[in-house]
Image (cartoon, grey):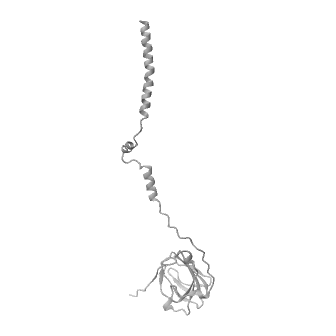
């Protein structure tokens, strides 16, 4: 009897030792099963954060579009020549010496020297108008010019005077000397000019 009980105890201990090994193998087998990712996505609850790819798409859509690249600018060199003054500009009472900036910058800006033709005729010259520009600057190279600027009034500009005219500001020339020459820089090269007609009613 004692021998049998000892044998049965040994068998029980061997069975107990073998049981964890079998269960660990079973767990290892279960954990090694492939995970169904699609099922995990289907099981996702509504209201959860968007997937990383969706967040990236939204972020890229919110970014501002880069400004279009302008063509490469060229060097513009202009030497004085009396023949370069031509009556082909905005004002019929002036001659213009184009400095080649418009062509070199592909229309980004224009620069020219303006000679007003004497004598000044206020009926032709003194007309209130505006320019649809981004920037406009005038520098008096020689002589003088009297102008009206909205918000400033009448101003006498003499040799060395310089002023800017903000976009669409109302202005006009009132008078000028017989020898006046102006340097004008404008952005863009081509722009719209609107004459302001006085309402006498």
Q: Is residue 47 above or below residue 62?
A: above
Could you say where residue 85 lies in the image, as x and y percent from the top left? 57, 87
Q: Foreground: 111 or 144?
A: 111
The residue at the far top in this view is 1
Occupied quadrant, residue 72: bottom right
Q: Is residue 39 left or right of residue 176?
A: left
Residue at the spot 57% in from the left edge and 76% down from the top edge: 104
Q: Quadrant of the C terminus?
A: bottom left
**Residue at 42% across / 9% down in the picture?**
5
The residue lying toward the viewer, choosing from 116 and 127, is 116
Q: Quadrant of residue 74?
A: bottom right
**Where residue 86 appears, x then y in whole percent?**
55, 87
Q: Nearer the viewer, residue 135 or 6?
A: 6
Which quarter shows the N terminus?
A: top left
Find residue 196 and report its horizontal and vertical position in percent.
44, 84
Point out residue 112 in the picture as x, y percentages from the top left corner: 57, 82
Q: Is residue 174 above or below residue 56?
A: below
């Amino acid at each position: 009897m004692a021998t049998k009980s000892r044998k049965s105890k040994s068998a029980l201990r061997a069975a107990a030792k073998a049981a964890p090994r079998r269960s660990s193998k079973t767990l290892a087998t279960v954990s090694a099963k492939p995970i169904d990712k699609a099922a995990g996505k289907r099981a996702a609850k509504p209201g959860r954060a968007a997937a990383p790819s969706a967040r990236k798409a939204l972020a890229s859509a919110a970014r501002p579009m880069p400004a279009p690249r302008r063509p490469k600018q060229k060097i513009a060199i202009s030497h004085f020549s009396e023949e370069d003054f031509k009556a082909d500009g905005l004002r019929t009472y002036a001659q213009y010496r184009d400095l080649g900036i418009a062509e070199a910058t592909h229309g980004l800006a224009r620069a020219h020297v303006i000679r007003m033709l004497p004598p000044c005729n206020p009926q032709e010259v003194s007309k209130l108008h505006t320019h649809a520009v981004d920037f406009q600057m005038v520098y008096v190279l020689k002589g003088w010019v009297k102008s009206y600027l909205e918000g400033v009034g009448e101003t006498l500009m003499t040799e060395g005077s310089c002023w800017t005219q903000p976009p669409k500001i109302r202005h006009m020339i009132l008078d000028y000397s017989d020898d006046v020459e102006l340097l004008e820089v404008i952005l863009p090269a081509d722009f719209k000019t609107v004459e302001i007609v006085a309402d006498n009613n």
